[in-house]
Amino acid sequence: MSKSSKKGIGAMGSWLHKKIVDPFIKIIRRGAEPKQLAFSTALGISLGVFPIVGVTVFLCGLAIALLGPYVNAPTVMLANFVATPLELSLMVVFLRFGEFVTGGPHFPLTADALKKVFTGEASTEIFGSILHALLGWLVLAPLILGALYIILLPCFIILVHKLSNASNPKLTTPSSTDLRLKVRDN
Protein backbone atom coordinates (compact mmCIF):
# COMPACT_ATOMS: atom_id res chain seq x y z
CA MET A 1 0.00 0.00 0.00
CA SER A 2 1.42 3.39 -0.96
CA LYS A 3 1.90 6.27 1.44
CA SER A 4 -0.83 8.32 -0.24
CA SER A 5 -3.42 5.54 0.12
CA LYS A 6 -2.46 5.03 3.79
CA LYS A 7 -2.79 8.77 4.30
CA GLY A 8 -6.24 8.68 2.66
CA ILE A 9 -7.39 5.81 4.87
CA GLY A 10 -6.08 7.58 7.96
CA ALA A 11 -7.89 10.78 6.97
CA MET A 12 -11.11 8.84 6.39
CA GLY A 13 -10.78 7.12 9.76
CA SER A 14 -10.15 10.46 11.43
CA TRP A 15 -13.19 11.97 9.71
CA LEU A 16 -15.42 9.01 10.73
CA HIS A 17 -14.19 9.25 14.30
CA LYS A 18 -14.77 13.00 14.43
CA LYS A 19 -18.20 13.01 12.72
CA ILE A 20 -19.73 9.75 13.97
CA VAL A 21 -17.90 8.03 16.83
CA ASP A 22 -17.17 11.08 19.02
CA PRO A 23 -20.72 12.51 18.84
CA PHE A 24 -22.13 9.05 19.48
CA ILE A 25 -20.00 8.59 22.61
CA LYS A 26 -21.07 12.04 23.85
CA ILE A 27 -24.72 11.09 23.38
CA ILE A 28 -24.29 7.89 25.37
CA ARG A 29 -22.34 9.61 28.16
CA ARG A 30 -25.08 12.19 28.61
CA GLY A 31 -27.20 9.49 30.21
CA ALA A 32 -29.71 8.43 27.55
CA GLU A 33 -31.58 5.19 28.14
CA PRO A 34 -30.68 2.14 26.01
CA LYS A 35 -34.30 1.70 24.86
CA GLN A 36 -34.52 5.31 23.76
CA LEU A 37 -31.15 5.10 21.99
CA ALA A 38 -32.10 1.87 20.21
CA PHE A 39 -35.47 3.26 19.12
CA SER A 40 -33.95 6.58 18.04
CA THR A 41 -31.21 4.89 16.03
CA ALA A 42 -33.65 2.47 14.40
CA LEU A 43 -35.99 5.36 13.59
CA GLY A 44 -33.19 7.50 12.16
CA ILE A 45 -31.99 4.68 9.92
CA SER A 46 -35.53 3.70 8.86
CA LEU A 47 -36.33 7.28 7.90
CA GLY A 48 -32.83 7.77 6.51
CA VAL A 49 -33.37 5.16 3.81
CA PHE A 50 -36.45 6.96 2.44
CA PRO A 51 -36.13 6.57 -1.35
CA ILE A 52 -36.30 10.26 -2.23
CA VAL A 53 -32.95 11.99 -1.72
CA GLY A 54 -33.00 15.16 0.35
CA VAL A 55 -36.23 14.46 2.19
CA THR A 56 -34.84 12.40 5.06
CA VAL A 57 -33.75 15.36 7.22
CA PHE A 58 -37.28 16.79 7.08
CA LEU A 59 -38.78 13.39 7.91
CA CYS A 60 -36.46 13.02 10.90
CA GLY A 61 -37.30 16.54 12.07
CA LEU A 62 -41.00 15.78 11.80
CA ALA A 63 -40.56 12.52 13.71
CA ILE A 64 -38.61 14.32 16.45
CA ALA A 65 -41.33 16.96 16.71
CA LEU A 66 -44.11 14.36 16.88
CA LEU A 67 -42.40 11.88 19.20
CA GLY A 68 -40.70 14.46 21.42
CA PRO A 69 -39.56 12.86 24.69
CA TYR A 70 -39.67 9.33 23.29
CA VAL A 71 -36.69 9.91 21.01
CA ASN A 72 -33.20 11.26 21.40
CA ALA A 73 -33.02 13.94 18.68
CA PRO A 74 -29.23 13.92 18.17
CA THR A 75 -29.29 10.13 17.83
CA VAL A 76 -32.06 10.24 15.22
CA MET A 77 -30.13 12.81 13.17
CA LEU A 78 -26.80 10.98 13.54
CA ALA A 79 -28.41 7.70 12.44
CA ASN A 80 -30.00 9.52 9.49
CA PHE A 81 -26.55 10.81 8.50
CA VAL A 82 -25.04 7.33 8.80
CA ALA A 83 -27.87 5.86 6.69
CA THR A 84 -27.15 8.03 3.64
CA PRO A 85 -25.07 5.41 1.78
CA LEU A 86 -27.77 2.84 2.55
CA GLU A 87 -30.42 5.18 1.17
CA LEU A 88 -28.73 5.29 -2.19
CA SER A 89 -28.15 1.54 -2.34
CA LEU A 90 -31.68 0.57 -1.24
CA MET A 91 -33.55 2.70 -3.80
CA VAL A 92 -33.55 -0.11 -6.34
CA VAL A 93 -34.64 -2.62 -3.68
CA PHE A 94 -37.61 -0.44 -2.71
CA LEU A 95 -38.44 0.12 -6.38
CA ARG A 96 -38.43 -3.59 -7.19
CA PHE A 97 -40.35 -4.50 -4.03
CA GLY A 98 -43.00 -1.85 -4.83
CA GLU A 99 -43.30 -3.28 -8.34
CA PHE A 100 -43.67 -6.75 -6.85
CA VAL A 101 -46.38 -5.66 -4.39
CA THR A 102 -48.45 -3.90 -7.05
CA GLY A 103 -47.70 -6.27 -9.88
CA GLY A 104 -46.75 -3.17 -11.86
CA PRO A 105 -44.46 -2.98 -14.86
CA HIS A 106 -40.74 -3.40 -14.37
CA PHE A 107 -38.97 -0.04 -14.76
CA PRO A 108 -35.84 -0.70 -16.83
CA LEU A 109 -32.59 0.54 -15.33
CA THR A 110 -30.65 0.73 -18.58
CA ALA A 111 -28.73 3.39 -20.50
CA ASP A 112 -31.62 3.67 -22.96
CA ALA A 113 -34.06 4.30 -20.10
CA LEU A 114 -31.71 6.94 -18.69
CA LYS A 115 -31.62 8.64 -22.09
CA LYS A 116 -35.43 8.72 -22.13
CA VAL A 117 -35.43 10.24 -18.65
CA PHE A 118 -33.08 13.04 -19.71
CA THR A 119 -35.06 13.80 -22.86
CA GLY A 120 -38.38 13.85 -20.97
CA GLU A 121 -39.86 10.88 -22.80
CA ALA A 122 -40.24 8.75 -19.68
CA SER A 123 -42.02 11.15 -17.32
CA THR A 124 -44.97 8.84 -16.58
CA GLU A 125 -42.67 5.86 -16.13
CA ILE A 126 -40.49 7.87 -13.72
CA PHE A 127 -43.54 8.97 -11.72
CA GLY A 128 -44.72 5.35 -11.52
CA SER A 129 -41.30 4.13 -10.43
CA ILE A 130 -41.14 6.77 -7.68
CA LEU A 131 -44.55 5.63 -6.44
CA HIS A 132 -43.39 2.00 -6.49
CA ALA A 133 -40.26 2.90 -4.53
CA LEU A 134 -42.33 4.82 -1.97
CA LEU A 135 -44.72 1.89 -1.60
CA GLY A 136 -41.80 -0.50 -1.16
CA TRP A 137 -40.38 1.74 1.57
CA LEU A 138 -43.78 2.12 3.28
CA VAL A 139 -44.16 -1.65 3.49
CA LEU A 140 -40.57 -2.40 4.53
CA ALA A 141 -39.86 0.57 6.87
CA PRO A 142 -41.81 -0.81 9.87
CA LEU A 143 -40.02 -4.15 9.44
CA ILE A 144 -36.65 -2.38 9.23
CA LEU A 145 -37.51 -0.33 12.33
CA GLY A 146 -38.53 -3.39 14.35
CA ALA A 147 -35.58 -5.52 13.28
CA LEU A 148 -33.08 -2.75 14.00
CA TYR A 149 -34.62 -2.09 17.42
CA ILE A 150 -34.36 -5.77 18.35
CA ILE A 151 -30.74 -5.93 17.14
CA LEU A 152 -29.64 -2.60 18.61
CA LEU A 153 -31.20 -2.85 22.08
CA PRO A 154 -28.70 -5.39 23.49
CA CYS A 155 -25.85 -3.43 21.89
CA PHE A 156 -26.95 -0.20 23.55
CA ILE A 157 -27.44 -1.89 26.90
CA ILE A 158 -23.80 -3.00 26.76
CA LEU A 159 -22.53 0.35 25.43
CA VAL A 160 -24.43 2.42 27.99
CA HIS A 161 -23.14 0.18 30.76
CA LYS A 162 -19.54 0.52 29.53
CA LEU A 163 -19.67 4.23 28.75
CA SER A 164 -22.06 5.30 31.49
CA ASN A 165 -21.70 8.29 33.73
CA ALA A 166 -19.83 6.22 36.30
CA SER A 167 -16.81 6.20 34.01
CA ASN A 168 -16.88 10.00 33.86
CA PRO A 169 -17.14 11.53 37.34
CA LYS A 170 -17.83 15.02 35.92
CA LEU A 171 -21.11 13.86 34.42
CA THR A 172 -22.48 11.82 37.32
CA THR A 173 -25.80 12.94 38.70
CA PRO A 174 -25.87 13.55 42.43
CA SER A 175 -27.91 11.22 44.58
CA SER A 176 -30.97 12.48 46.45
CA THR A 177 -28.93 12.52 49.69
CA ASP A 178 -26.30 14.73 48.05
CA LEU A 179 -29.01 17.07 46.81
CA ARG A 180 -30.54 17.38 50.30
CA LEU A 181 -27.13 18.13 51.75
CA LYS A 182 -26.49 20.83 49.15
CA VAL A 183 -29.90 22.41 49.81
CA ARG A 184 -29.22 22.50 53.58
CA ASP A 185 -25.81 24.09 53.01
CA ASN A 186 -27.30 27.01 51.09
Image (spheres, grey):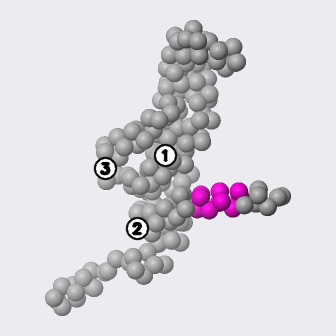
Label 3 environment density (alpha carbons within 10 Å; few <14, some 14–19, many ≥20): few
Q: Position of residue 28 (x, y in %)?
A: 46, 65
Mark 2 residue type:
Gly
> In the rendered view, would you say 122 is above or below 147?
above
Query: In which quadrant of the rendered image does the N terminus lie?
Result: bottom right
Earlier-in-chain disc, 1 versus 2: 2
Residue drawn at the location 70% of the way across and 18% of the way down: 111
- Measure the C-alpha gap from mark 3 to mark 2: 17 Å
Q: Considering the image in quadrants, where does the C terminus appear?
A: bottom left
The residue positioned farthest toward the top in the image shown: 121
The span shown in magenta is 8-17
- The answer to which of 108 and 99 lies nearer the viewer is 108
Mark found first going from the N terminus, 3 or 2: 2
Secondary structure beneath disc 2? loop
Q: 119 and 122: which one is in front? A: 119
Q: Residue furthest bottom?
A: 185
Residue at figure coordinates x 41%, y 62% from the top left: 33
Reading the image, the residue beneath label 3 is: 68
Q: Nearer the viewer, mark 1 or mark 2?
A: 1
Q: Position of residue 181 (x, y in %)?
A: 22, 88
